[in-house]
Image (tube, grey):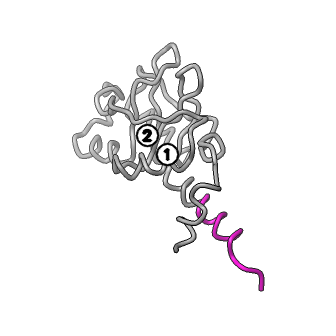
Amino acid sequence: MPIHKRLQKSLKVSVRLLMSAPLITVDTSSSVQAAADVMWLEKIGALAIVDPSGNLAGIVSERDMLFAATKGLFQKSSNISEIMRTNVVTIGAEDEAAEAIQMMRTHNIKHLVVLGSDNKPVGMVSMRDVLDLAALLLSVLQPPD
């Protein structure tokens, strides 16, 4: 039996331990260019978009930025709301990491916004976070020389 099936019920990791935090966001009033600048500066593949109250309004990924570039939306007048996706898949910070990974697989997404107990965004789980966890687990499970 594969090791992931043998350990499935005994290894619990919360999303809080898996996620990248603090969450990097821009406001709904930001321009596409400003959001792209933040993503470039922070070296991230997705950005949470929040309203003035700090509630999640949407998400923008590298793919969305590519779309914006092909449509000429990097002008000063282009607002991030023109390209953000509002049907954001989210998970709670105290949920299990395995559930987050399954959600990412089910929805075929690379970024999952994490909500705190107040339903405000607190972090993000990316494929990079999942790979980092997998690498750590593989190093722990590797037999000693």
Q: Which residues are magenta?
A: 132-145
Secondary structure of residue under mark 1: helix
Secondary structure of residue under mark 2: helix
Quadrant housing residue 60: top left
- Which residue is tagged 1? 100
- Which residue is tagged 2? 36
Query: Of residues 76 and 133, which is closer to you in this image?
Result: 133
Q: Position of residue 106 (x, y in %)?
A: 35, 49
Does the magenta-highlighted stretch encompass residue 137? yes
Q: Is residue 76 above or below residue 138?
A: above
Q: Residue at x 49, y 14 (%)?
A: 52
Query: Of residues 91 and 65, which is closer to you in this image?
Result: 91
As measured in the structure, the alpha-carbon distance from the residue carrying label 2 to the one carrying label 1 is 26 Å
Q: Residue furthest right?
A: 145
Dominant SS in magenta: helix
Q: Residue furthest left?
A: 71
Q: Are marks 2 and 1 in contact (CB under 8 Å)?
A: no
Amino acid on which the number 2 mark rests in the picture: Ala
Q: Position of residue 16 (x, y in %)?
A: 63, 40
